[in-house]
Image (cartoon, helix red, strand yellow):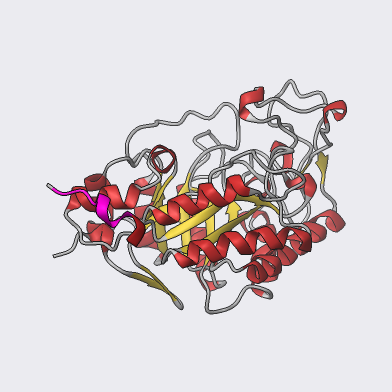
């Protein structure tokens, strides 16, 4: 019997050859939002390495939605050409290309990690950020984010819609809306960052409105037979913040609004979070959402071993497993895990002579 991690899985018209997904991971290697050969080789190598789904990093729907000046973007039709090359190569390797659409909100205008992850000033190309409320991520930030008015909210919703159109035209087969890690969608969800008194703040129903409007707009452009994911932070790991009960309730609503899978992560909203990091620490969130909201889920976070990942699928705790740092350490993660689990998989013909034998 084949290991569960290497069983087929279908969402709408897409049949994944296994349950292994390369998680979206920022590369901070773009200029003006444009992809280049780094992104082609980085994503392409992982398609060669056997994962079923290759998720492109958080790709900004507008220039001001970037985390850093070096983020990928999809706010212009001119961005599409290189993405078509990337998606075509991934598809040629019997894998599916996915894209995560994002807006960083108050966590935008930051330097790259190797430049200190610090807020950029205007002289460095930095910009004034936006947020549901004028509350900074760090208390010592010199400039407060601008509280978004209705026009600003409508603009971002339309930016996501146009980005979805471009993603479709670029050849992506899975689209994920980034609603986690303290970025703009998450900022609206959590009462710690959303202090609004209009229809986008206060009650749970009001705080989820922006995300629901975004999903409605995206679905106008994204094909109905292709998967739509949403990444959520299952909890803020902070008192008075967004929590697992909220996530389960939202996931059930998202299922009714055309979302196919919840990508279950956590944290990232506030700097005073207390995360109990350890192997599988976010898997219980994925399991609870799957069982209580009756929607497909993925697990992510400190999942590094083949048997560990296989058990998650075998025990019904999630439907897919996303690998981030482990997929950076080993671009051939699926081929490696197949060997460890004695799963029969098809290797790229160019690499067949290198197959591992016991």
Q: Can residue 229 be seen in the rendering of this structure?
A: no
Q: Can residue 28 be seen in the rendering of this structure?
A: yes
Percent across and percent down for residue 332 are 36, 48
Percent across and percent down for residue 289 are 41, 57
Percent across and percent down for residue 337 are 26, 49
Name above or below for residue 213 compared with residue 48: below
Name above or below for residue 294 compared with residue 210: below
Question: Magenta stretch containing residue 352, yes or no?
Answer: yes
Question: Magenta stretch containing residue 20, yes or no?
Answer: no
Magenta residues, as a range? Answer: 351-357
- In the rendered view, does 154 fall on the left or right side of 45? right
Quarter of the image for residue 277 reads top left
The answer to which of 270 and 99 lies nearer the viewer is 99
Quarter of the image for residue 242 reads top right
Q: How many marks?
A: 0
Could you tell me which residue is drawn at 63 percent across and 64 percent down?
84
Percent across and percent down for residue 47 are 44, 56
Could you tell me which residue is drawn at 75 percent across and 66 percent down?
162
- In the rendered view, does 145 fall on the left or right side of 320? right
The answer to which of 249 and 332 lies nearer the viewer is 332
Could you tell me which residue is drawn at 35 percent across and 57 percent down?
350
Q: Quadrant of the N terminus?
A: bottom left
Name above or below for residue 283 compared with residue 346: above
């Amino acid at each position: 019997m084949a290991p569960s991690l290497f069983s087929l899985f279908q969402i709408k018209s897409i049949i994944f050859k296994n349950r292994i997904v390369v998680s979206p991971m920022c590369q901070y290697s773009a200029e003006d939002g444009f992809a280049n050969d780094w992104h082609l080789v980085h994503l392409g190598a992982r398609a060669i390495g056997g994962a079923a789904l290759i998720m492109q990093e958080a790709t900004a729907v507008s220039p001001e939605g970037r985390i850093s000046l070096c983020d990928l973007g999809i706010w212009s039709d001119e961005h599409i050409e290189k993405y078509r090359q990337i998606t075509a190569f991934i598809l040629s390797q019997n894998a599916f290309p996915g894209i995560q659409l994002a807006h960083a909100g108050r966590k935008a205008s930051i330097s790259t990690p190797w430049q200190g992850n610090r807020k950029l000033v205007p002289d460095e190309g930095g910009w004034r950020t936006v947020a549901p409320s004028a509350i900074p991520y760090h208390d010592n930030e010199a400039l407060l984010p601008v509280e978004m008015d209705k026009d600003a909210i409508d603009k971002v919703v339309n930016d996501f819609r146009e980005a979805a159109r471009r993603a479709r035209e670029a050849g992506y087969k899975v689209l994920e809306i980034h609603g986690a890690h303290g970025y703009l969608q998450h900022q609206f969800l959590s009462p710690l960052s959303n202090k609004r008194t209009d229809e986008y703040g206060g009650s749970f129903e009001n705080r989820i409105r922006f995300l629901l409007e975004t999903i409605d707009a995206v679905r106008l452009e994204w094909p109905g037979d292709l998967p739509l994911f949403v990444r959520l932070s299952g909890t803020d790991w902070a008192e008075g913040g967004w929590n697992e009960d909220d996530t389960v309730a939202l996931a059930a609503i998202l299922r009714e609004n055309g979302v196919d899978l919840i990508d279950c992560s956590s944290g990232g909203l506030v700097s005073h979070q207390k995360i109990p990091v350890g192997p599988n620490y976010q898997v219980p969130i994925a399991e609870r959402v799957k069982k209580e909201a009756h929607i497909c889920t993925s697990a992510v976070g400190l999942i590094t071993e083949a048997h560990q990942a296989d058990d998650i699928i075998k025990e019904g705790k999630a439907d897919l497993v996303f690998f981030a740092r482990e997929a950076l350490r080993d671009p051939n993660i699926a081929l490696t895990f197949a060997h460890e689990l004695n799963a029969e998989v098809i290797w790229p013909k160019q690499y067949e002579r290198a197959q591992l034998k016991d």
